[in-house]
């Protein structure tokens, strides 16, 4: 226990130091702020459009119509103070001569021919009011001849209820996939936003030459263990900072922004699949953290470590290219291998668990292999940092690591 008596101090120092960095909060808040800005623009645009539409409705302009389709109801034309013109040519001439502001021609077969709108130019945005009136006359006329049910069908507003069965039992479908699938989304976001911080955590002190001073007060094992624990907690904080504002924004403004409406009461929470997803996520994140810390400990600078970062990303996210196979062919040897090989397993296991085609035995075996790999990689990270912390000019190779271990034993 005496070897780790400074672990709490290292953990606290590393956590607070990163939390004080503006770049941490910039990365953490960047996605929610981008989300808010994007949909804020959409919301503002919708409000502006609605206000403009109301203003256009208040504006009066003289209108003439020729209705060869016989679809527009006469009472609507009368309410809009619209006069009827016998021929299209006469209506167009009246617009040209300034006798009327706009003219609309409804052809005989609207399904095959275009409704033609002619009007006085009143500006790029104001000219749209003529077409809006044409659309409104048609919509109101057709709606008055059919019932509400027919209108809902034509406007694709029919509500559907779908029930599916798997092995004789009711299956939740996509509602059953959402809860365990969130862990896949969170894992992807954490690696995307926090991967570089993990990589540079063990090279920062080496680059600025402060590691020598630190190691006079703290043992290497304590220092790197504190860093790893700090990284995990910081990743959790960043995850919450990213997800909570987005979720709150969706619940508060989702309907106003015309975002897809989700009935949370329909979600299916399978405790077995959610629990398995949580264990896969934690083991995968531990392994990924250990891989990046190990890589950073081997390299003298963050620049050199970044050159190998792509290889780690390819191992973890490469299986995304086989997403169709994971969903449609879960029993293929290719899918089995990627699901059980620890360094490619996170995505296949999380995805197949969400879809529901991951057998219990395969899930438990995959989790066991992931945990073993995570523990081994974290152990390796501690050992490599012990010998590579003072390596400033060259990367620590495996042969150099073996030689240093032999020298210590002697």
Image (cartoon, rainbow, N blue to C red):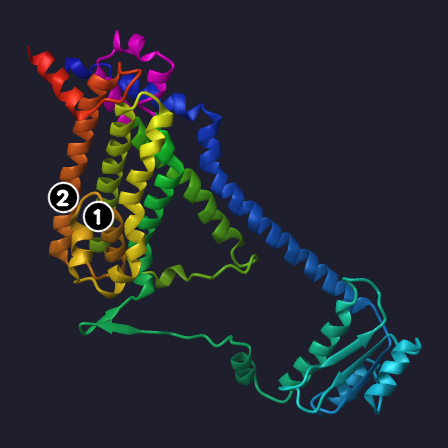
Say which of 363 and 165 sits in front. Answer: 363
Q: Which residues are magenta?
A: 201-228
User: Residue at 16% of width from left, 53% of height from top?
Assistant: 337
Q: Which residue is mark 1?
A: 345
Separation of disc 1 and disc 2 at Cα?
Answer: 9 Å
Circle 1 crowding by C-alpha within 10 Å: few under 14, some 14–19, many from 20:
many
Q: Which comes sooner in the sequence, label 1 or label 2?
A: 1
User: Residue at 30% of width from left, 49% of height from top?
Assistant: 318
In the image, residue 106 sits, relative to residue 264, either above or below, namely below
Residue 84 visible, this angle: no
Q: Is residue 104 magenta?
A: no
Q: Position of residue 83 (x, y in %)?
A: 85, 85
Q: Is residue 223 magenta?
A: yes
Q: Which residue is mark 2?
A: 369
In the image, residue 166 sits, relative to residue 362, either above or below, namely below
Contact (CB < 8 A) between labels 1 and 2?
A: yes
């Amino acid at each position: 226990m005496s070897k780790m008596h400074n672990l709490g101090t290292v953990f606290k120092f590393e956590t607070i130091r990163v939390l004080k960095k503006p770049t941490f909060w910039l990365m953490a808040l960047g996605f929610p702020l981008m989300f808010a800005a994007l949909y804020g623009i959409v919301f503002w645009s919708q409000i502006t459009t609605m206000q403009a539409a109301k203003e256009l409705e208040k504006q009066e302009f003289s209108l003439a119509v020729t209705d060869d389709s016989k679809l527009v109801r006469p009472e609507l034309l009368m309410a809009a103070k619209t006069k009827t013109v016998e021929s299209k040519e006469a209506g167009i001439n009246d617009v040209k001569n300034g006798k009327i502001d706009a003219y609309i021609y409804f052809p005989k077969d609207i399904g095959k021919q275009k409704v033609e709108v002619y009007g006085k130019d009143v500006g790029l945005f104001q000219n749209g009011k003529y077409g809006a009136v044409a659309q409104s006359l048609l919509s109101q006329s057709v709606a008055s001849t059919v019932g509400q049910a027919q209108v809902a069908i034509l406007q694709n507003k029919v509500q559907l209820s779908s029930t599916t069965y798997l092995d004789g039992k009711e299956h939740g479908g996509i509602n059953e996939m959402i809860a365990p699938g969130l862990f896949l989304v969170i894992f992807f976001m954490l690696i995307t936003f926090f991967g570089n911080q993990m990589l540079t955590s063990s090279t920062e002190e080496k680059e600025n030459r402060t590691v020598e001073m630190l190691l006079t007060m703290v043992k290497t094992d304590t220092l790197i263990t504190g860093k790893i624990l700090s990284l995990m907690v910081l990743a959790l904080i960043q995850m919450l900072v990213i997800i909570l504002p987005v979720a709150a924004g969706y619940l508060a403004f989702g309907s106003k922004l015309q975002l897809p409406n989700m009935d949370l009461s329909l979600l299916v929470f399978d405790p077995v699949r959610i629990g398995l997803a949580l264990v896969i996520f934690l083991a995968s994140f531990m392994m990924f953290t250990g891989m990046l810390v190990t890589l950073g400990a081997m390299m003298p600078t963050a620049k050199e470590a970044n050159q190998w970062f792509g290889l780690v990303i390819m191992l973890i996210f490469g299986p995304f290219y086989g997403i169709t196979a994971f969903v449609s062919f879960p029993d293929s040897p290719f899918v089995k291998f990627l699901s059980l090989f620890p360094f490619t397993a996170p995505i296949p296991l999380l995805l197949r668990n969400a879809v529901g085609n991951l057998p219990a035995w395969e899930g438990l075996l995959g989790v066991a292999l992931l945990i073993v790999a995570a523990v081994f990689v974290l152990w390796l990270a501690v050992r490599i940092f012990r010998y590579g912390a003072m390596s400033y000019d060259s990367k620590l190779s495996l042969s150099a690591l073996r030689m240093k271990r032999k020298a210590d034993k002697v």
